[in-house]
Amino acid sequence: MRIAIVDDDPLVRMGLRAILGSEAGWDVVGEAGDGEAAVALAARERPDVVLMDIRMPGVDGLEATRRIVSAALPTAVLVLTTFELDEYVFDAMRAGASGFVLKRVPPAELIEAVRVVAAGESLLFPASTRTVIERFVAREPGVTLPELTEREQEVLRQLARGRSNGEIASELFLAVETVKSHVASILMKLDVRDRTQAVIAAYESGFVAPGSPSD
Amino acid sequence: MRIAIVDDDPLVRMGLRAILGSEAGWDVVGEAGDGEAAVALAARERPDVVLMDIRMPGVDGLEATRRIVSAALPTAVLVLTTFELDEYVFDAMRAGASGFVLKRVPPAELIEAVRVVAAGESLLFPASTRTVIERFVAREPGVTLPELTEREQEVLRQLARGRSNGEIASELFLAVETVKSHVASILMKLDVRDRTQAVIAAYESGFVAPGSPSD
DNA sequence: GGGGGGATCCCCCGGACGGGGGAGGGCGGT
DNA sequence: ACCGCCCTCCCCCGTCCGGGGGATCCCCCC
């Protein structure tokens, strides 16, 4: 197991090195004090895991993580942070980090975390997991649209694909007038003015979700 | 710490009881073999943690979890499963579970997991964390819309709020004709036919996200 | 048997929308 | 100085959309 340590504080680096170096077969192959050096270090040494601090002078840990991940190195990034700032978690996830743990976790847990990310898995400390799950669940369906009939739901799905009344008519083998009357019902039930607002309501309510096939 | 165990297999219940009962101060206050009994048990004993199996005859663990969570008991649900089926993770999260671990984790980790969820935090086993993060990140912005100018982005945001050309004009202190010409540029750049399709593109690309404030 | 809701279709109409054209001013790069 | 791009505004026009009336049929439920 080859590990790189990135932190602007030499003391922290020393502490981490002491913890990880004590593990049999583990080797700290380099240290860096800023994001710039971290990216170079990762490219040169291609370690299995990089322990990455976020707050650093110059290029920060998130940007460094992005670069390392986008360089397609065989390297997992484990973000270490002092504070439980939730936004950091999401930023780190978006940056491509494999894990997110607090610096003050017990050494045994830190070692376990390194093992986990090196194995290609991911890991968050519990408070973050909670936040992530909450935000995830918050994006779920949730709101139910006022009861639309089967047909109206069908038409609304078509609307949410950007179809015109005429296209919907063809698609569903209906007269345009029928489609118009369904659309009118939908607008009334959803209490919106036009088809665009109906589509917005469909997205906001989770009736349709981004990423679903367009047709 | 008061714990309830729910699993349709008596052997598993016995094993769990043995593991958890060995912790000082921990007390297994009840067992249940199906979801129905689990809900009743949780309501009666109000344990700190319920270990919940998913696959059970009758009412399954997910439904039982939903009922326990919606009953607003002071009880955290830790879902135990034999298989790493990803969909279970998401279902469990939606059902309101605080944690999701494999049955075959080492006793020490299981105990730690119980401790974590009892503390009100959440926890997933590493492979699930990875999946959750991937799905989470997949829902993030990602796609960039064809380069829209500042003004066009502004107008598109308004479109995505369901505003008419006239309303956008008022909002941005513009003539309706100006709005129309911006809209026309947007339609051309996004290669769509009308404002509704533009809004769909805005949602699908992550330019706007469900759940953002409507105004 | 009657009533109600859903689904289908029809007509009229005004206004919003989208396509086409053009034009002027500002700002930055060559 | 010129060009290109953006932002702003203007006109014309055909189409689609949404609102207002309807109507007929079917099915379920009381």
Image (cartoon, coloured by chain):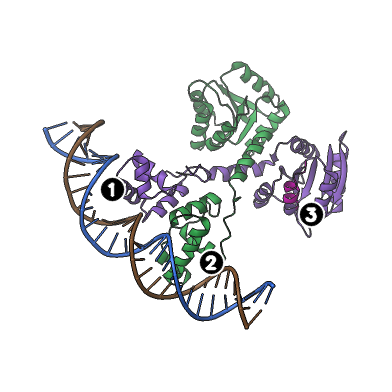
Chain colours: A purple, B green, C blue, D brown
Mark 1–mark 3 CB contact (< 8 Å): no
Q: Chain ID for label 3?
A: A
Chain holding disc 2: B
> In the drawing, what numbered circle is on residue B166?
none
Q: Which residue is mark 2?
A: B151
Tell me what residue is drawn at x 79 percent, y 59 percent. A57
Q: Position of residue A56 (x, y in %)?
A: 78, 56
Q: Residue at x 50, y 63 (%)?
A: B185
What segment is highlighted magenta in the picture? Answer: A64-74
The crowding category of the residue bearing disc 2, from other C-alpha atoms within 10 Å (few below 14, some 14 to 19, many at least 20), is few
Mark 1 lies on a secondary structure that is helix
Instruction: Verify CB contact (< 8 Å) between mark 1 and mark 2.
Output: no
The kind of residue on which mark 1 rests is Glu
Amino acid bearing label 3 = Gly
Q: Position of residue B152 (x, y in %)?
A: 52, 64
Residue A177 is marked as: 1
Residue at numbered disc 3: A35
